[in-house]
Image (tube, rainbow, N blue to C red):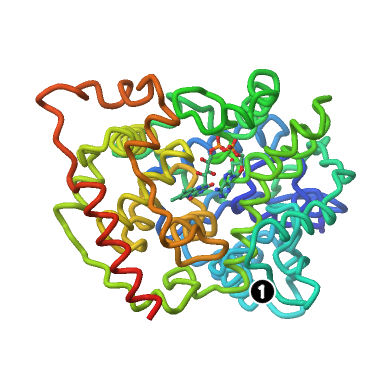
Amino acid sequence: MATTAICWFRRDLRLADNAALAAALRGAEALVPVYVMPARCGRSEAGWLAHSLASLDAGLRKHGSQLMVRHGPAGEVLSALAGECGARTVHCTRMWSPAGLAEEHAVADALAPGRVGLVVAEGSLLVAPDAISTGAGSPYRVFTPYFRAWEGLWDGSALPGGAPEGIPAPGGTVASEPLPPVPAVAPDPTARWTPGEPGAARRLEVFIDDALAHYDEHRDLPALDATSRLSPHLAFGEISPRQVAAAVTGSGLPREVTRPFLRQLAWREFAAHVLHHHPHTLSEPLRPEFARMPWSDDPDALAAWREGRTGYPLVDAGMRQLADTGWMHNRVRLVAASLLTKHLLVPWQTGERYFAESLVDFDAASNVFNWQWVAGCGADAAPYFRIFNPTVQAKRFDPDGEYVRRWVPEVGSDEYPSPIIDHAEARERALAAYSAVRR
Ligand SMILES: Cc1cc2nc3c(=O)[nH]c(=O)nc-3n(C[C@H](O)[C@H](O)[C@H](O)COP(=O)(O)OP(=O)(O)OC[C@H]3O[C@@H](n4cnc5c(N)ncnc54)[C@H](O)[C@@H]3O)c2cc1C
């Protein structure tokens, strides 16, 4: 009987530099590639996922294979599938989020003991969250020393693996459910990206050719297409961080030019490190004293923020960009999140959930980490007394108003609302609220 292996695709929707796929192919005469649909995912993520799975299926078909799709708890699905196709091993990439690890354990427990084994490979991060610690052996809470240690561990010498030469067909009669349809309500990601592995590779190439040289200088200017926009591709694993880092370091540009970009990739890994060591921060602040923060759920203010009518043009532009495209520029994410948590005192968890539902690049670790950072209650957080002035931020980072006009054409007219809250008053209120935390 042919040796059959299952490759369980998760957020590693690529063929190249996929250690789980490479391991599954080693010695297998038949390979069953499968994706188990998540019980729930955000509106924007669902749109991206549908395109990404179609792209992965097309890539597999070029090799004479095809993607199987199944619904249900991963443990049940994979143990039933292993029974159907006679597989002895299930291969997957480790997902370091608390939910990803819990799913991995559930699958390992569900597979028939002694008959089917789960083999887990790394690949979603350059440095695993538990492979890095301070001199005292504890997890990092401050980014700069983390980054120094991270750079030492990841030296750029590990080159990404290529795409497999051949993929043996599943063999037998393993049935697949249809690929998920593209949801009608989500923003259309194909307007600005090409979801899937080839689109991710192309985006990286374009970024390196057109924008990497000026990344540090321009990355805070939302009117420009000056950042990589690789975040959704990375979130779905259509490209590995190793592929990105290797291409950037191998670009021929000097280290002082490439390092600011690698530093941003390291923020992604720092967020995963913090969440791994403090899984309760998915819903609670890392700094426990912030439980005393007098947050106020204000439905009208929240609705104005979500709909981009706070009267602060940079924030409104960002929120409309998010609603329309599923993505927002990082500088604007910072200012929009700050307005919600500091000016409006709406709990960071409320904003975090809205972003989770809306972002095409939603990543639990990065989202929670950044929301807590902005609110002042997370790792390496901005000090509580640093409260962005959204008007000053707009002048500094969108000096000609080009970004704002693109998303808020009525700015400056009678149709545009006045600010939902006065900045000076909001600042005093936030400082008073934070003093309760410090007491
Ligand atoms: C409130 C808030 C919520 C956020 N939620 C998410 C999220 O759910 N998913 C997500 O991927 N990013 C999130 N970010 C981080 C950041 O805004 C995006 O990663 C970035 O805007 C993506 O655009 P890019 O690919 O062009 O970034 P680039 O500037 O080209 O950076 C390259 C890569 O580095 C990583 N990166 C850059 N900045 C950060 C950062 N601050 N934190 C973590 N990783 C970073 C991303 O993977 C990004 O693709 C959030 C930031 C804020 C302030």
Graded by Cα atoms within 10 Å as few (under 14), some (14 to 19) or many (20 or more), the crowding at tag 1 reads many
Q: Observer-nearest residue: 417 or 121?
A: 417
Q: Residue 70: give x, y in percent of width and height.
A: 51, 55
362 sits left or right of 116 in the view? left
> Visible in this render: residue 33?
yes
Q: Observer-nearest residue: 32 or 194?
A: 194
Q: Residue 415: give x, y in percent of width and height.
A: 11, 26
Residue in the image at 41% along x and 39% along y: 332
Q: Residue furthest left?
A: 414
Q: Residue 215: give x, y in percent of width and height.
A: 63, 29
Secondary element at image label 1:
helix
Placement of 300 over or under 261, stated as above or below? below
Placement of 247 over or under 136, stated as above or below? above
Q: Residue furthest right?
A: 157
- Which image quadrant for residue 375? bottom left
Marker count (numbered): 1
Q: Which quadrant of the figure contains the N terminus?
A: bottom right
101 sits left or right of 132 in the view? left
Placement of 267 over or under 119, stated as above or below? above
- Which image quadrant for residue 229? top right
- Which image quadrant for residue 288? bottom left
> Visible in this render: residue 46?
no
Name the kind of residue labelled 1 in the image.
Answer: Ala
Q: Observer-nearest residue: 294 or 128?
A: 294
Q: Observer-nearest residue: 140 or 48?
A: 140
Q: Residue 36: give x, y in percent of width and height.
A: 53, 56
Question: Where does ligand 1 appear, by image quarter?
Answer: top right
Residue in the image at 19% along x and 45% along y: 304
Residue in the image at 66% along x and 49% along y: 33
Name the residue carrying label 1: 108
